[in-house]
Image (cartoon, rainbow, N blue to C red):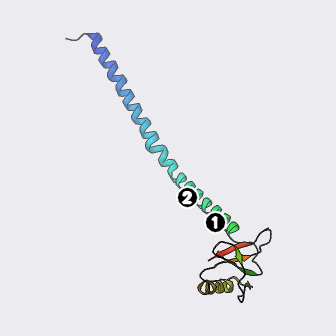
Amino acid sequence: MKSAADQSNIRAFLLIGSSVAGFSSFVYNLFGNTIPSVFWVHLKEIGAALIMIAVFVFAVAWLLKAKPHKKPQRYLIKVFDVFGQEFALDGIRTEFKTHDVAWSFMKNYKKSYPMYNFALVSDLPNSERMTIFRYL
């Protein structure tokens, strides 16, 4: 037979064990289900808003950086030889008012003179050097 002291130790152990198990179940349920479910709706909305703000900031930064603020008034075609030195070909038009016309002429020049490279450049305001738009 077990003594009264052993039985009281077992009861105390069972009481403390069940209390710890019950409390840990309560804490697990509180932090695992209750609190996240209350805040989850708000956290999803905040996350979506942060993503939209990041996309908007990226788009605005890209638009401001990618496009010149003022369109050039004239475009030039620069000719380069195989060594990368600027070269002057006689009989070709090199100054244009629109980008599309200059690009079209540059493509035709590349077909006619395959040993030369061509750059479509313009002098942008607030720039010390010519800006290259296209290079063939």
Taking the spot 57% from the left edge, 58% from the top edge, the residue there is: 51
Of residues 116 and 48, the one drawn nearer to the viewer in this rendering: 116
Of residues 55 and 125, the one drawn nearer to the viewer in this rendering: 125
Residue furthest out toward the left = 1
Residue 64 at what x, y percent from top left? 70, 67
Instruction: First in sequence, mark 1 or 2: give its number.
Output: 2
Residue that numbered label 1 is attached to: 59
Residue that numbered label 2 is attached to: 48
Quarter-of-image position of residue 50: bottom right
Quarter-of-image position of residue 73: bottom right
In the rendered image, the quadrant that contains the C terminus is: bottom right
- Distance (Cα) linking label 1 and label 2: 17 Å
Residue furthest out toward the front = 83
**Which disc number belongs to residue 93?**
none
Number of other residues with Cα within 10 Å of mark 2, as a class: few under 14, some 14 to 19, many 20 or more: few
Q: What element carries label 2?
A: helix
Of residues 112 and 95, the one drawn nearer to the viewer in this rendering: 112
- Residue type (three-letter) at the residue carrying disc 2: Ala
In the rendered image, the quadrant that contains the N terminus is: top left
- Residue type (three-letter) at the residue carrying disc 1: Ala
